Image: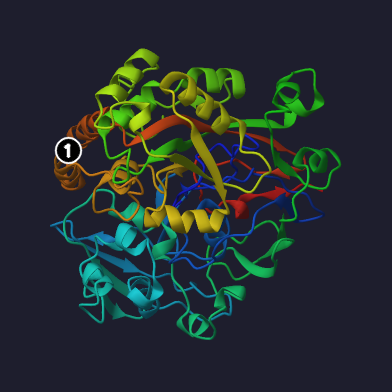
Amino acid sequence: MKQLSLFFAGLALAGLVAVGCGGSTSPESGGGSGGGTGELTILGSDPPTLDPALSGDTESATYVVEIFGGLLTLNSDLQIVPDLAVAMPEVSSDGKTYTFKLKDNAKFHDGRKVIAQDFKYSIERAADPKTQSTLADTYLGDIVGVKDKLGGKANEVRGVTVVDDRTIKIEIDQRKSYFLAKLTYPTAFVVDKANVESSKSWTDKPNGTGAFKLAKWQIGEKIVLERNSGFHLEPAKLTRVNFILAGGSAMTMYENKEIDVTGVSINDIDRVRDPANSLNKELIESPDLSVGYIGFNNTKPPFDDIKVRQAFNYAADKDKIIQVLYKGLVQKANGPLPPGIPGYNTSLKPIPFDPEKAKQLLKESKYGGPSGLPTITLSIPGSTATPPPFSEVLREQWKTNLGIAIKIQQIEWATFLEDVKKGSYQMFQEGWIADYPDPEDFLDILFHSKSNNNNGRYSNPQVDRLLEQARVEENIDKRLKSYQEIEQTIVNEAPWLPLWYGKSYILVKPHVKGYQPAPMIIPNLRLVSIEK
């Protein structure tokens, strides 16, 4: 979500489902809920952080969007709507200045009123180099002065002006149609200065503004969220949400009524999809705005050679992986943009499976063939005894079709997120789920050479130029056509091996009402209720 978004693309590869929202994806299997009156109990994972300025993965964002909030948010239809703001902002004639009025009942969890200065502090904190946010430039960088603050050239963000306690103005560098969507991402959420400065471990007791408060966090055991009765919108129907972190068999827990919601694994999908099975009536199938892929570090040998990257694409039989290994439960990805995103191109020309072409390209590369290549390692998040089946199948395909022996290494999720951003890996498994429904969130954020989320270090000056033009293009048809042309160029140059577009398969107990999986991470738990 917005959250910084590096998760495993709508498809938790162990369980074949992701339950939640946007940005990078986690490799964990999404999971359930259970509970008593007014309580929902679901499976979860320990988040790398609960700091909105640092929240760039789905595990963190799942909790952050419920505990914190911003000026704007996304509703269940993915429309931008007011959160702490009274209404959508007034916009200047040049499209660069937004004036927001705050709700009179906007309060932190401790009861203190949220004022405009809190937002200025929060944006400047996110942009402070000391905060070490890798997200501020991406999601707040359009605001005048953010880049200067990030670069240590300014003490404040001059594009954020406090007019009075209830009014704040935000000025951006150019008119951009997607800017308001970025304000729904956690990096723009408001935090309480006194809370943040109270302790280095302030997120253990965060003073947010969201529909839920963090009541308990026992690492590796549970996270408990409790209803914020003073929430400025309609308070949550649930009194409590219990996230079980200890693991176990999600399906067994669901069938034993220990949890109320669960993702369905590849091992159980056939019986659950059988209309004769009682669980079938509890199944929800929902597409995600996500993509799973293998990323190549375009600056590290041998993937600094376009022909090597193309060869690895031509040598991968994605149809076999999806149909045989995953029973057709996900859609093959031809490029970065998933179905449902504006600008999705049904006429995109992907790199097809062609082993002979793969061998030819590898021979034509500067490495001259398999014998000239360095040792290649595929880095994946996880800590299982054996790598996930899809990575083993890919390794076998590359060995058969290219004559290359690939090593696989697994890395703990939080460490993986840090290292992939540093460019530490040659080749890596990753995914991306939308932070907001706009092609800019995929193509610009993931492929512009100066983007902090360009983890493959892809660089093409022409693509950069076209992306920058698309940012300010006001004609929507022209803008989307430009993104389609950009995507085709990216696919041709193969900085990734796109694998699949995600889909969620979720079981929900009949007594749980209003639980609808969103195609990306949004704050929606307050809409859920338990029928007695």
Q: How many marks?
A: 1
- Corner quadrant of residue 280: top right
Give the residue at x 19% y 34%.
482
User: Considering only vertical position in the picture, is 436 above or below 221?
Assistant: above
Q: Nearer the viewer, residue 47 or 69?
A: 47
Q: Nearer the viewer, residue 361 or 321?
A: 361
Coloration mode: rainbow
Q: Nearer the viewer, residue 422 or 232?
A: 422
Left or right of 383 in this view: 397: left
Dot 1: few (<14), some (14–19), or many (≥20) neighbours within 10 Å? Answer: few
Give the residue at x 62% y 46%.
28
Q: Which residue is mark 1?
A: 475
Three-letter code for the amino acid on which mark 1 is drawn: Asn
**Residue 56, visible in the rendered structure:** no
Residue 386 drawn at (x, y percent): 66, 39
Residue 477 drawn at (x, y percent): 21, 32
Dot 1 falls on a residue whose secondary structure is: loop
Q: Nearer the viewer, residue 442 or 110?
A: 442
Residue 287 drawn at (x, y percent): 52, 32
- Corner quadrant of residue 486: top left
User: Considering only vertical position in the picture, is 45 above or below 343?
Assistant: below
Identify the residue at the far front of this view: 371
- Corner quadrant of residue 284: top right
